[in-house]
Image: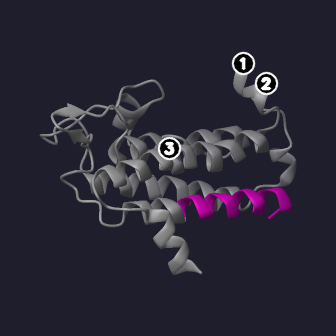
Amino acid sequence: MGEYAETLVRGGRVSLWMAEQILKDVKPETFARKPNFGGKVIDTNHPAFVYGHLATYPSKWLSAIGPDASIAAAPAKFDELFAAGKPCLDDPTGTIYPPMKEITDAFFATHKAALEVLGTTDDAKLHATNPREGRMKEMFPTVGGMLMFYMTSHMMMHLGQASAWRRCFGLGSAHGRACRERL
């Protein structure tokens, strides 16, 4: 593994560790619910949407570095439900989104598969020109820069949404407890 690839894999593993912490004490019956205070639904992303959305990205990472991206693909229906720009809907009857276990299993399986492949990637592929067009290429001219963003910044931004959601449901901070336990 190249030095750049190792750095990316380490960052990705920290993101996955945080994703595990945020799920602690989350119940399947609230996983796809939006907070409701005094009859007012708070328009925020719930964990079902966050984890489902993030599960759609690892195959995109792999397609940027060349191997068969299907080994890290989420179920086909995830793109329809969780693609960028799709709305996060409150799901009180559990009929819009797949069950918690299906979503979280897909999230962890896709990310672990992608990290496994990334760990064997030569740094030259990460220094290659980003194949995306537009703003993403402007911000991240190399494949490695784009992957760094998706594996850390993008993931942590969405996990922050799930962390705030936890507080709305009275579950407290996942980060504070997790850091204390880890140290």
Alpha-carbon span between mark 2 and mark 1: 6 Å
Q: Name the residue under label 2.
A: 138
Residue reaching furthest to the top: 134
In the image shown, does 28 or 70 lie closer to the viewer? Answer: 28
State left or right for residue 134 relative to residue 159. right
Q: What stretch is highlighted in magenta?
A: 1-16
How many marks the image carries: the answer is 3
Q: Nearer the viewer, mark 2 or mark 3?
A: 3
What type is the residue that disc 3 sits on? His
In the image shown, does 159 or 7 lie closer to the viewer? Answer: 159
Mark number for residue 158? 3
Q: Is residue 14 magenta?
A: yes
Q: Mark 1 points at which residue?
A: 134
Q: In what quadrant of the picture does the N terminus appear?
A: bottom right
Q: Which residue is drawn at 30% across and 34% down?
A: 42
Cβ–Cβ under 8 Å for marks 2 and 3? no
**Spot occupied by residue 72 in the image (x, y as percentages of width and height):** 52, 49
